Amino acid sequence: MPDTAHIEGPLPETTLGAGLAALLGEVLPAARGLQVSDLKRTTSGLSRENWVFEARWRDEEGARRQRMILRRDPPASLLVTDRAWEFRVLRALESTPVPAPPVRWVDADGARFGAPAMLMDFLDGECDWFVLGGARPLAERVALGRRFIDLLAAIQAVDWRTLGLGDARPEQAYGAHAELDFWQAEYERVRLEPLPEMDLALAWLREHAPVAQAVVLVHGDFKPGNALLVGERINAMLDWETAHLGDPLEDLGWITNPPRAREQQIAGAWTRAEIVAAFTAATGFEVEPRALRWWNVFSCWKLSVIVLTGVAAFTAGTMDRIYHAPAWLVQQMLALMEA
């Protein structure tokens, strides 16, 4: 195996290609004549390096070819997540109706390519953040919005207990306070100066945290920009790195959050009210308005922490994309809290 361990920063394509060929020899033990070609890093993804390539080999079934993608942790990221957990979720989803990329291998500690990485099959489809507000006919866009809610319902219907996605915590430990604990720790890790408005919002969130009516699988970043579309069909939901167990209203709060209206809603046709009604019909869960508003505020706060992570990384010189303090999100939070 090429010595790709201990490499920090971006990998040279020649080194990565040789490492992938060696890896595939282990992942596909029956393969002969393995070749890796057309290796390139895509521009999509702000939190992971995405390396797309084509693998060719022969086995007992004849000549084979498969496009694959290696997702590798970069030197700096907007999100600190666990490749082993993401792999575990994706492997579990392979036995469910939820469309997600099939996974083949994971290196949780980065021993192989110098940083944690995961290998999966590459799926066809178009990724369009603003497809719901795009040029497609209105009826087609509304129907697609409903399919997104049906997909969310399918995710929440996953039997995570049978699939072994739980841990030692009691079920009542999942939900609002658990998410606040996680994101507060991230906030305290990355903030560079006092942020009284963020602290005020955090105190409000602690005081008004709702109790989850159930524990479900939460995607964590459910949006059209994380879906692969083939025509009118959702071919796959991507980016499961922030998936976790929690409140069924968490993803709904992300979808209906005012800052994401351009991505998630269609003015006059697929608004907050229609989305909530479709969610209730598809899942059977009650949507208490105050609880949903809480998750809207939380979504703003969480997104603010992610932006602050970018600010800290740029200030430290580990990321070259410029991020600014999330004042616009703070304004949204305060308005939602007053409501």
Image (cartoon, rainbow, N blue to C red):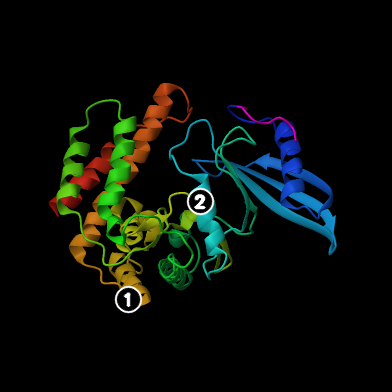
* Residue bearing mark 2: 86
285 horizontally vs 205: left or right? right
Element under disc 1: loop
Specify the quadrant of the image occupied by residue 280.
bottom left
Say which mark, if any, is on residue 140.
Answer: none
Q: What x and y, as percent, mark residue 244?
A: 40, 55
Residue in view at x 61 percent, y 35 percent: 111
Q: What x and y, as percent, mark residue 84?
A: 52, 47
Which residues are the magenta region?
Answer: 1-7
Q: Residues within 10 Å of mark 1 (few under 14, many from 20)?
A: few
Residue type, label 2: Glu
**Residue 71 appears in the rendering:** yes
Residue toward you, 117 or 67: 117
Q: Residues within 10 Å of mark 2 (few under 14, many from 20)?
A: many
Quadrant (top left/top right/bottom left/bottom right) for the C terminus: bottom left
Residue in view at x 42 percent, y 28 percent: 313
39 horizontally vs 318: left or right? right
Relative to 208, say whether 284 is above or below: below
**Residue 227 appears in the rendering:** no
Residue toward you, 291 or 173: 173
* Residue bearing mark 1: 284
Was residue 313 drawn as part of the magenta stretch in this picture? no
